[in-house]
Image: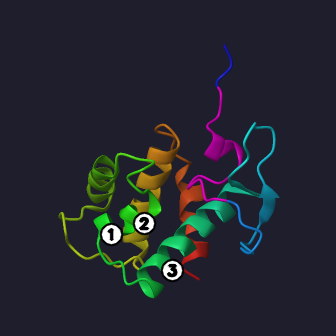
Amino acid sequence: MPITETRGVRNQNPGNIDYSPRNAWQGQLGLEVGVPKPRFARFDSAENGIRALGKLLLTYQRKHQLKTVAALIGRWAPTNENNTAAYVRAVEASTGTRPGAEVDLTTSAVMQGFVKAIIRHENAGYAYPEPVLLEGVRRALL
């Protein structure tokens, strides 16, 4: 039996970022294809999908002043679509962050842990090879 890729992996959009024509993400190809109700963006590479994920998180932190894992994930994955409390715990574990502590996403190790946990949560446990993850994070932090 063939292994089916998750939607996020298939779209090279491991954060499952909604498509918006207003966003000019680096490497964005447009709206996903081949699904009954297209919603998510497609990217030309996993690295650019990870870059967009990281850039969006940085926007949440800088523009919206979201400083804790709970605040960031609360915006990323609202409770009407997710078990946000479990999501927060998974990200805190991945980043080594105490509940309620402020995080600095401009720190590469913190961003890596955050992105890795989001990818795992959004894609049924999937993990990209370390070089792909690191390159996506590097691009996000430029």
**Circle on res. 59:** 3
The residue at the far top in this view is 1
Label 3: few (<14), some or many (≥20) within 10 Å? Answer: few
Residue designated by label 2? 75
Give the crowd class for mark 2: few <14, some 14-19, many >=20 residues within 10 Å: some
Q: Is residue 118 left or right of residue 85?
A: right
Is the residue under label 2 in contact with that under label 1 (CB below 8 Å)? yes
> What colouring method underlies this structural image?
rainbow
Report the residue at 31% width, 66% height from top: 69
Image position, residue 102 (x, y; %): 25, 76
Q: Percent position (x, y) of residue 105?
A: 40, 76
Q: CA distance from mark 1 to mark 3?
A: 13 Å
Name which residue type carries label 3.
Answer: Thr
Q: CA distance from mark 1 to mark 2?
A: 7 Å
Q: Which residues are magenta?
A: 4-18
- Helix, strand or loop at label 1? It is helix
